[in-house]
Image (cartoon, helix red, strand yellow):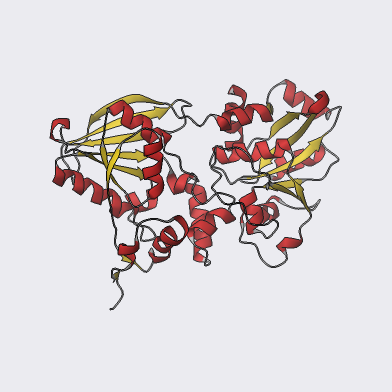
Amino acid sequence: MYEAERGLFDLRRGRPLHVVAGEAGGAVTGVLLATAEGLTHETLSLLRSVSEGPIRLSVTHHRAHAMGLTPSPPAGHVDRTAGHHTGDVSLLVDADASPGAIWKMASERPRDGAASADICAASVPEIAGLTLSRLGELLPAVVSVPLGEPLDRELQSRLDSRTILTVSAEQIAALAANVQVEVTHVSDGPVPLEEAEDARFVCFREANGILEHVAILIGARETWPDPVPVRLHSACLTGDLFGSLRCDCGQQLRGSLRVFSARGGGVLLYLAQEGRSIGLGNKLRAYTLQQEGLDTVDADCTLGFGPDERRYDAAVQMLRYLQVGPIQLLTNNPEKVRALQSGGIEVADRRPLYGTLNRHNLPYVKAKVDRAGHWLTDMLSGPIRGKRS
């Protein structure tokens, strides 16, 4: 799995990757691939120089459906760690296509005529590349060329010197299948807050060393009510820090702290899951698509992601480490309740947590209700700030 972890790092740096897959009978197929995100003329020229085969753009089944290339994905969410889906496809790219043109194919809202693209099922190495890009919170779209034997001399030299890494699809699949998150306590210290002066921050790091999460403990443990109020809050830079009107995240964050303070304490788990775990860059891309008329779910799927890429394994591990339970969960999201209960955390009660409606976040809140089943009907029936009654 180590090679797959380094491969993820290389993709995030914009480097190409040699991905191979074993087949029945001992045959091995391989591709040289790079992500559509950050694709340069130099990398594209390298791909063209090492293979006589066509350049292919591989996208997820979510993106393929948004482009009108495949039927609707089957019911049920396929998360970012669950590996590939049989609907992942590859499109042939024009021989003279530029990085910019490929980027548009991979990310822009599809227009009329997209459904006529020449497509085929993505190969195992291409699917592995898509999986790795999703794990790295990159746009899930990869550009690749097939490789034959013998390999191009320049490519072989780079592989021998390990300036281009070889990773097997099996190694990537093993990394993706490792869904049990282990968190390690890193440090903690007092951090008085405006809403709660008696607060302590506890930092946790996932075992792979990539993500860090924070538990904010409000009040002394002996003063906590029973059940303990708990909030699982996914990081939202735009809402939490800058007060974005597109969402209610910042209001929920500060509202939960006020609830904890008023009730004698509680625990807020601040999880590194920006944009439902698609990352800040993709979240901003989704905002642009929402500006064009798509709702939150359709915008994410247009970029190639599922309706919600978040997992809550880290939250379960953090609560176990802190020995917190039974809990009163402050949430409007049924999936959070299910995830904690499945992880063995006793959710004795649930308390709603509403923000304020405005003309910017109204579509966002409606999508939560209509597309994800969030318990926000009461909030939708309330007044819209800044709108005359």
Indicate the quadrant where residue 134 lies: top right
Looking at this view, is 372 or 27 the one in front? Answer: 372
- Which part of the image, by quadrant, shows the C terminus? bottom left
Residue at the (37%, 69%) spot, across then down: 359
Q: Note whether 175 is above or below 105 in the view shown.
A: above
Please indicate whether residue 307 sits to the left or right of residue 268 in the image.
right
Measuring from the top left, give residue 86's x and y in whole percent: 68, 44
Q: Vertically, is 11 above or below 368?
A: above
Q: In this view, does 242 lie to the left or right of 40?
A: left
Q: Is 157 left or right of 197, judged from the image as shown?
A: right
Please tell me whether residue 116 is drawn above or below residue 141 in the rendered image.
Answer: below
Q: Can residue 288 be seen in this view?
A: yes
Height in image: 170 above or below 82?
above
Q: Quadrant of residue 182?
A: top left
When asked about the image quadrant of residue 136, the answer is top right
Residue 364 in the image, given as x and y percentages of width and height: 42, 61
Q: Nearer the viewer, residue 276 or 51?
A: 276
Q: How many marks?
A: 0
> Can see residue 13?
no
Residue found at the far top of this picture:
160
Please provide percent x and percent y for residue 5: 57, 27
Name the quarter where the N terminus is drawn.
top right
Q: Residue at x 74, y 40 (%)?
A: 123
Question: Residue at left 81%, top 38%?
Answer: 49
**Rendered location of residue 82, percent (x, y):** 57, 38
